[in-house]
Amino acid sequence: MRRIWIYLLIGFSCLTAALPAVAQSGEMPFPASLQKELAARASSYSEVTLDRKMLGFASQFMNSQKDAEGKRIVAKLKGVYVRSYNFAKPGQYTLAELASIRQHFQGPDWTPIVKQRTQNATDDSDIYMKMVNGQVEGMFILNSQPKELDFVYIDGPIRPQDLADISGNFGIPQVKTGQNGKVTHK
Amino acid sequence: MVEEFDELERELREQLQPRSAPPGFAARVVARAAEQQPDAASRFAWLRGNSSGSGTRHPVWQWATVAAAAVAMLLGGVEHQHQQRIEGEHARAQVMLALRITAATLKDVNEKINQPVQASQAPNTVESR
């Protein structure tokens, strides 16, 4: 009887040890606790999490002409993670919190394209590209404003042309990326 | 008085004495029970299209059951498709929202790095490749 309890204890310990590894396989790019805190402080917010399976499912229903561009873009992607928080007053996020968001995108594969820093982080901008074997395999965008904080992670191959298409197709003036990587209005 | 009691006792003994059932009694009881309670197999024989059970056949009920099953399956399929469509439309709306926010964020960053830099509002660091 005592031996059974010992086996059960060992089994439970193994299971508990394996759980973080399982959790990592469905890894979220942004700190979960921070997202909850930001959402609690926000007057309104949008959080969109779409993994490859969800993108594939959604694309089955993107059959109209106006969805064609979006469908083409998401067809290759592994995931799209969008967070947008609007605050009633300034000062609702800290420098340290922005640093913890950026932390996931600091590996050797990530290349900063735009990195703008301001006092108190109230007007920061980041665009990082994930380069693997010379190919863009992901993109991270962060934009902070006194009463707004937006960050986006697109996982998967995305071309500069896709960015221009995204900009031009959703009621936003089109953006053109030049050879030097500088972004200009079209 | 004692004689009366003796007589009563004798009658009681006679009446309560065990007697064997008449011949064929058990067989008659079993036959009657079978007539009154047909077994479950024969009761549902009509479902199998088998008339041997109760001796009667109900083709209307048989077809009605098949039709009801078909309608139930059809309705289930339609409901499932409807549910899938709702979920699909929701997922599609999520994709479009994600793309819209991404586009708006890109636009904001673009405007920031392209706006003329004023000394009072100059950011501490700007890197652009």
Image: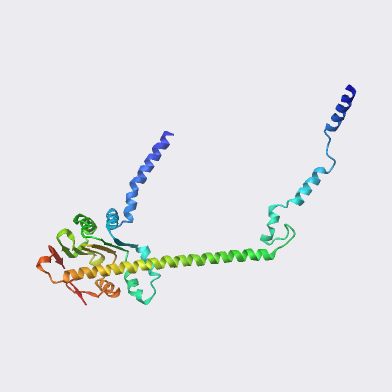
Position of the C terminus of chain A, as image quadrant, is: bottom left
Give left or right: position of B47 versus A140.
right
Q: Quadrant of the N terminus of chain A?
A: top left
Q: How is the image coloured?
A: rainbow
Residue closer to the observer: B109 or B119: B119
Q: Identify which residue, B43 or A116, lies in the foreground.
A: A116
Q: Residue furthest right?
A: B3
Residue for point 26% across, 69% down: B104
Q: Is residue A168 above or below residue B12?
A: below
Residue A138, located in which quarter of the rendered image?
bottom left
Q: Which quadrant of the view contains residue A161? A: bottom left
Identify the residue at image location x=75%, y=50%. B34
Q: Nearer the viewer, residue B25 or A36?
A: A36
Q: Position of residue A101 (x, y in %)?
A: 24, 57
**Which residue is farthest top?**
B2
Q: Residue furthest front?
A: A88
Residue B98: x %, y % from top left: 31, 66
Residue A22 horizontal side relative to residue A161, left or right: right
Would residue A158 be seen by someone viewing this image from the given angle? Answer: no
Q: Residue at x 31, y 53 (%)?
A: A24
Is residue A105 visible in this depiction of the protein?
yes
Residue A14 horizontal side relative to residue B123, left or right: right
How many numbered circles are shown?
0
Splitting the image into 4 quarters, where does residue A30 fall?
bottom left
Residue A141 in percent (x, y) is at 24, 64
Give the residue at x 16% y 58%: A120
